[in-house]
Amino acid sequence: MLHFAHNSKLHAAALALSLTLSTSVQAAAPADAPANPAEMQKMMQQMMSIMTPELQKKIQSLSPQSKQTMARLQSLHDRRSDTLTMVQVMQEILSDYQRMATAIAVDNADMAIDAAHNLAHHRLPRGGLLPYMPLDKISNESVDALLGFQDMVEGNTLRLAEAAKEGNMAKAAGYLGPIAQGCVACHNHFRGQPGISPNVAPKK
Ligand code: HEC
């Protein structure tokens, strides 16, 4: 069980979001949504309760559909860390990606399937994805873009696992490029150059 700090003002805002969510979720739950909207609501409420009021306001301003998409995306990831940051989770993802590539190179289908499963079911960092995105990048358009990145990375990773299960390592290898394109696309959208030092002039 995760433990979240509670602050009544934050909690009230979280509750307001979850109420918006519950109506939209019930009105138009997509076919692949998890069956339990109450569970989804509780998860979003917990995540919101540890966010700054600024970020909460940003999320509140999303359309009901985008809120629902975010809730669904995050509820699909039921391994949630109460401590890890996005960079730490990304390091796990990179490591799983490399493990898939190694497995394919050495014709080890079981290893490829394990790594693919781990990547597709990666942990969520503390507070979910949104706290690690620049505030000005949190918009309805970005939430839609996230769905595309999710299919490029996790969809193709699951396809890679299927191909490995069929023993077709050549087909599995074909998914490595499209997965990497998903990493690149999301980084282009949400991330600048990693690890820039404030103590050196930027390259012109
Ligand atoms: C949903 C969008 C998204 C996807 C998809 C994504 N990343 Fe990231 N990644 C980010 C963001 C945002 C950061 C910066 C987080 C921060 O600085 O707090 C990041 C950071 C990283 C980092 C940490 C070092 C750095 O460059 O900042 C690594 C390593 C990384 N990603 C690897 C990957 C790999 C490998 C994949 C594909 C298998 C991938 N990522 C897919 C959004 C994404």
Image: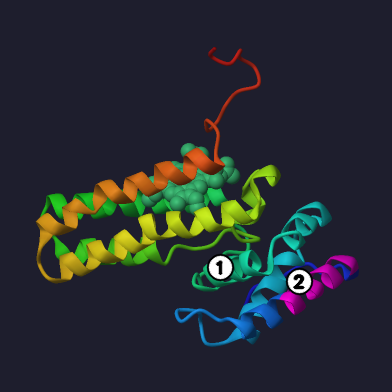
Place of residue 52 in the rendered image (x, y in percent of width and height, measured from the top left): 79, 55
Along the line of sight, the residue nearer the viewer: 151 or 54: 151
Q: Is residue 33 above or below residue 89?
A: below
Which part of the image, by quadrant, shows the N terminus? bottom right
Residue behind mark 1: 74
Query: 95 left or right of 47?
Result: left
Quarter where residue 200 is shown: top right
Element class at badge 1: helix
Rendering colour mode:
rainbow
Place of residue 109 in the rendered image (x, y in percent of width and height, measured from the top left): 15, 64
Mark 2 or mark 1, whichever is nearer to me: 2
Residue behind mark 2: 17
Q: Residue at x 26, y 65 (%)?
A: 159
Along the line of sight, the residue nearer the viewer: 202 or 63: 63
Q: Which mark is residue 104?
A: none
Q: Which residues are magenta?
A: 9-20
Quarter where residue 169 is shown: bottom left
Q: Is residue 162 above or below residue 177?
A: below
Query: 47 left or right of 11?
Result: left
Q: Residue at x 57, y 58 (%)?
A: 125
- Pointer 2 and pointer 1: residues touching (CB < 8 Å)? no
Q: Residue at x 48, y 38 (%)?
A: 188
Element class at badge 2: helix
Place of residue 49 in the rendered image (x, y in percent of width and height, measured from the top left): 77, 67
Residues packed near mark 1 inside 10 Å, few (<14), some (14 to 19) or many (20 plus): many
Main SS of the magenta part reads helix
Place of residue 168 in the rendered image (x, y in percent of width and height, measured from the top left): 10, 63
Q: Is residue 32 above or below residue 143?
A: below
